[in-house]
Every structure is written in C-alpha cells, then in structure tokens.
Amino acid sequence: MLSRKIGISPPFIFAGKIIFACVVALLPTLLFTLSHVYALLMAGIIYGVSFLITMSILKPLGDKEKQMVKTVNPQLATVVRYF
C-alpha cells in the first residue's frame, strides 16, 4: 500500500532489472576456474560483455529518464540511449 501511496514501484522494477542482468551475466563466468590471472581477465571480459548485452535487451531506462540524462549530460546520453 505504501508503494502505491508514494509511487516507489518504478525504482523496484529498475533495480530488479539491474540485478537480473548481473545474475545473467554472471552465469557464463561460472564455467571458468579462476586459478590464473588470464582466466580471471577472461571471466571479467565475458561478464562485462554479457552485462551490456543483457542491459541492451532489458532496457531498464524509460524515455523520461533518458531525456533527463540528456539535459544533464549530453555526452552520457549517447551511451544511455542503448539502455
């Protein structure tokens, strides 16, 4: 009832999408045994790429948020438009 009263459900949806993207990106990295530095670097790269792909599919930011970012920082708006 409180979330309806003060309108805090959108941040829960946004945070849920971010957490889901983190978990999905983590799954491919579990295939590596992180015993070497190179395996750790490879897992980090795979995590980063998987996270970016998942975020571009989920698109957690709405048009209103993208417009706000564009007014605050135009350089960041060029990156945020994919999410």
Image: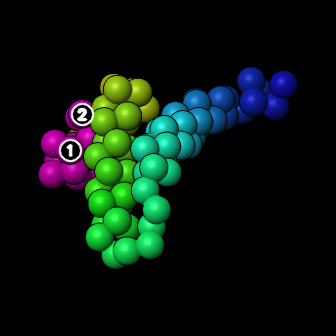
| Range drawn in magenta | 72-83
Residue 76 rendering spot, x and y as whole percentages = 22, 50
Q: Is residue 10 visible?
A: yes
Q: Amino acid at mark 2?
A: Tyr
Residue name at image x 29 percent, y 46 percent: 49
The local crowd at label 2, few if under 14, some if 14 to 19, many if 20 or more residues have their Cα within 10 Å, is some
Residue 79 shows which numbered tag?
Answer: 1
**Residue type, label 1:** Val
Q: Nearer the viewer, residue 58 or 14?
A: 58
Residue, disc 2: 82
Left/right of residue 20 with respect to residue 32 in the rendered view: right
**Chief SS of the magenta region:** helix
Q: Nearer the viewer, residue 29 or 70?
A: 29
Residue 37, relative to residue 6: is it above or below?
Answer: below
Picture residue at 59% right of the left edge, 36% below the top? 16
Q: Disc 1, disc 2: CB below 8 Å?
A: yes
> Helix, strand, or loop for circle 1?
helix
Q: Position of residue 63 (x, y in %)?
A: 33, 26
Residue in view at x 65 percent, y 29 percent: 9
Residue 76 lies within the magenta run: yes
Quadrant into which the C terminus falls: top left
Whether residue 44 is situated above or below residue 29 in the rendered picture: below
- Is residue 24 on the magenta stretch? no
Q: Dividing the picture into quarters, in which one does residue 15 lie?
A: top right
Residue ID at (26%, 41%)? 80
Of 78 and 65, which appears nearest the observer? 78
Q: Position of residue 82 (x, y in %)?
A: 24, 33
